Amino acid sequence: MCGIIGYSGHRPAVPVIMEGLRRLEYRGYDSSGVCFVRNRELQVIRAEGKLNNLEDKLADMDISLATAGLGHTRWATHGAPTENNAHPHVSFTRNLAIVHNGIIENYREWKDFLLDKGYLFFSETDTEVLANLIADEQAGGLSLLRAFAAALEKASGTYAVALLSTEEPDTIYAARHSAPLLIGAGAGEHFAASDIPAFLPYTRDVVFLEDGEIARITPLRAEVFSMADLKPVPKTLTRIEWDLQAAQKGGYKHFMLKEIFEQPRVVADCIAGRADTKRNAVRMPELEGFPVPSRLRIAACGTSWHAGLWAQSLMEGWSGIPTTVETASEFRYRNALPVPGECLLVISQSGETADTLAALRLVKEQGIATLGICNVIGSSIAREADAVVLTQAGPEISVASTKAMTAQMTVLMLTALYWGRKRGSLDREITARALAELSDIPARLTGLLPTLESEAAGLAARFAACKSMFFLGRGQSFPLALEGALKVKELSYIHAEGYASGEMKHGPIALIDPCFPSFFLMPYDAHFAKTMSNLEEVAARKGPVVALTNPPKDGMELRVGESWLLPEAWGPLCAFFMLPALQLFSYKAAAFLGKDVDQPRNLAKSVTVE
Ligand code: AGP
């Protein structure tokens, strides 16, 4: 998630902007930049890496006279994290600069259009295309406000964008679509920013922009217009009472909770540009030049390993590719025999996990094709794999991985569909149903999360005193059971075991007693009846049981124990409701026990050592 700040007021703009970018650092970034107007010319200073590199460049510049400007920290999605791709981006006409957060999905077609008109480009970014689209509208005679609106109407995708021009050097324009952007209203100064922390020390009075609105700010005025007809839109000020740290968490108590609630957006961003429900097609440009493997090995660690296990049946069922899944720490030492035409798929949020990286390097030496699914562009795995699919979940700050797994499952589903269609092993009805159901997940999950949170809190309070608990499931619910147990272990420090529920009879059921609860993951799927039997065997031995299941129908209902009801979802998509429920249960248990939720003891966010 990129960070945006625009300022127009009575102070020197650049120090205010740099301070604001520092308070947006928690969003994660790999390059940054600022721009302002001096002597009616745009001054644009950008740097790779951390803000110190940008500050070094600014140290020798005369920045005192500019009282308006833009700043940006970039989390690279299109184009490598280089200075050349850093924002702000200037139009070819050099009269306007923009900073942008989001993805312009149709930038390629507009870039071709503009190239045909003689525009030149100097970066790989979609943002530079938008800057030139605005300039082109201006060249057609439109005012800057109208040109901004006209260009945004042509852009499809997600954006929060702010603009500065040489014609109006103390005016910032800003607009948003599906990416946050807000206006800070101060005394003789105004701000446009992607998040409240950027200007919190200067003002607590905020106007939240909505999709389809354009803001125009100067030192003394902040106006909002409807993009459709440029009519003024009345807005109210909201008073923010948060402290800075709470603001960086978006008002959530912990980054983990914030990241759990970001999951609808994460799924939407993962499928954007990839899931084409109209054409019943899946676009994976990262895989176009990558050979469809004859056999797939998946290697990963922790939560990422659970995502791989969850995808195994999809890879085999939808793409028809024989698939095995292992922990990277085991795979790298067992002298696995390479098979011609196979592929190693490594899954890693950080892209730096030592065991996963070692597995990748091992098979590369054997001449095996390697594919990475990563959340951090420019990470070792992202750079060293033959191909990489970025999950674009935005930086995951909390040590406990949550939204990354949801993003990984989404990308794995799309990959199984993509390869299945390429191999002709998947009928069109399955693709159509999968894409349609997946496209509904963001809205359904948005509506569900608040209920899940309060239900999780009640359950967690009841079971937080337990010394041990089971999480049990069959089929694709088994990897989710492993994940549920991992989350409880790493967050609340309670011993929890994830197990295939069919295995209980083979020993573990000896552990059951009234203080040893079992959580059964049992959506209405082919395994429901068998898992019900396992649940009844546990209940018969006085073990407390809780079933994460769907509302009763057609006689499929619990005969013993209690239920935590989740909405039904088609096939594998039930995981997109089950997983957040498990995440919230572990979160609430940890919070109830007063644990350090975002930084659990003994854990690191990325295990870069063996
Ligand atoms: C997940 O909550 C853990 N923090 C941990 O298991 C993590 O998933 C594992 O270390 C793998 O990390 P990666 O996805 O960055 O490779």
Image: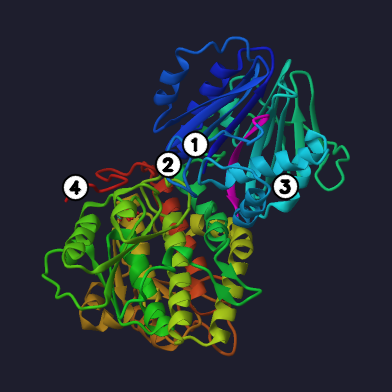
Left or right: where 461 falls relative to 91: left
The amino acid type found where label 1 is placed reads: Ala
Query: Residue at label 4?
Result: 609
Position of 40 relative to 326 (above/below)? above
Q: Which residues are magenta?
A: 94-104
The amino acid type found where label 4 is placed reads: Val
Q: Earlier in the sequence, mark 3 or mark 2?
A: 2
Distance Cα–Cα, label 4 vs label 2: 25 Å
Quarter assignment of residue 430: bottom right
- Marker count (numbered): 4
Distance Cα–Cα, label 1 vs label 2: 7 Å
Secondary element at tag 2 = loop
Query: Residue at label 2?
Result: 81
Residue 171 at least partly seen? yes
10 Å crowding of disc 4: few (<14), some (14-19), many (20+): few
Of circles 4 and 2, the one toward us is: 2
Residue 211 at least partly seen? no
Q: Are marks 3 and 4 in contact (CB under 8 Å)?
A: no
